[in-house]
Image: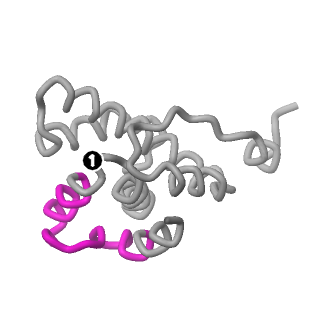
């Protein structure tokens, strides 16, 4: 018998976090992840951030490696949907040590460079994650 969606969502979400500037907000995001989509976004965000961290530690700039690292980390096809992708960016912008750089890179890609919020649908998400802090 395969597990039901309710069973899957009720299992603890264990994911090794990236280097965090706001671990409390990260944990609140994990604690509130009650759908398969929200859980997949957190897993993708952690994998993406850790991939970027490794490349940054090797001397690359975030701007040089963000897009390729995103593609490498996207095992859940999060980036096929702009809203879920922006949610991942917003989570990292709020919690990750390189989050501000990622937000700026992301916004530059979508034509809203210099703003505090992430572009497109992430504007709504940034405000919801800021409530986690």
In x, y percent, where is residue 7? 82, 44
Residue 2 is left or right of residue 126, and the answer is: right
Q: Within 10 Å of the Cα at label 1, are there few (<14), some (14-19), or many (20+) other Cα atoms?
A: many
Q: Residue at x 25, y 59 (%)?
A: 103
Range drawn in magenta: 102-125
Q: Residue at x 17, y 37 (%)?
A: 65
**At 41% from the left edge and 44% from the top edge, which residue is drawn?**
20
Disc 1 marks which residue?
98
Which residue is situated farthest in the right direction here?
1
Q: Is residue 22 magenta?
A: no
The colour mode here is: one colour
Q: Residue furthest top?
A: 58
Q: Provide residue 46's location: percent of width, then percent of height.
A: 44, 40
* Residue 116: in magenta span: yes
Q: Do we see residue 80 in this rendering?
A: no
Say which quadrant the N terminus sits in: top right
Is residue 101 in sight in this rendering? yes
Relative horizontal placement of residue 52, taking residue 104 as reference (left or right): right
Look at the picture and state if 13 lies above or below 104. Answer: above
């Amino acid at each position: 018998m395969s597990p039901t969606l309710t069973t899957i969502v009720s299992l603890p979400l264990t994911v090794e976090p990236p280097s965090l500037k706001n671990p409390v907000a990260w944990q609140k995001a994990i604690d509130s992840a009650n759908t398969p989509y929200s859980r997949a976004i957190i897993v993708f965000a952690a994998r993406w951030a850790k991939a970027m961290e490794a490349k940054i530690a090797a001397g690359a700039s975030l701007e040089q490696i963000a897009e390729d690292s995103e593609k490498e980390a996207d095992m859940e096809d999060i980036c096929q949907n702009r809203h879920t992708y922006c949610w991942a960016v917003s989570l990292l912008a709020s919690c990750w040590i390189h989050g501000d750089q990622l937000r700026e890179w992301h916004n530059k890609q979508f034509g809203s460079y210099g703003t505090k919020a992430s572009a497109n649908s992430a504007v709504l998400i940034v405000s919801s994650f800021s409530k986690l802090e």
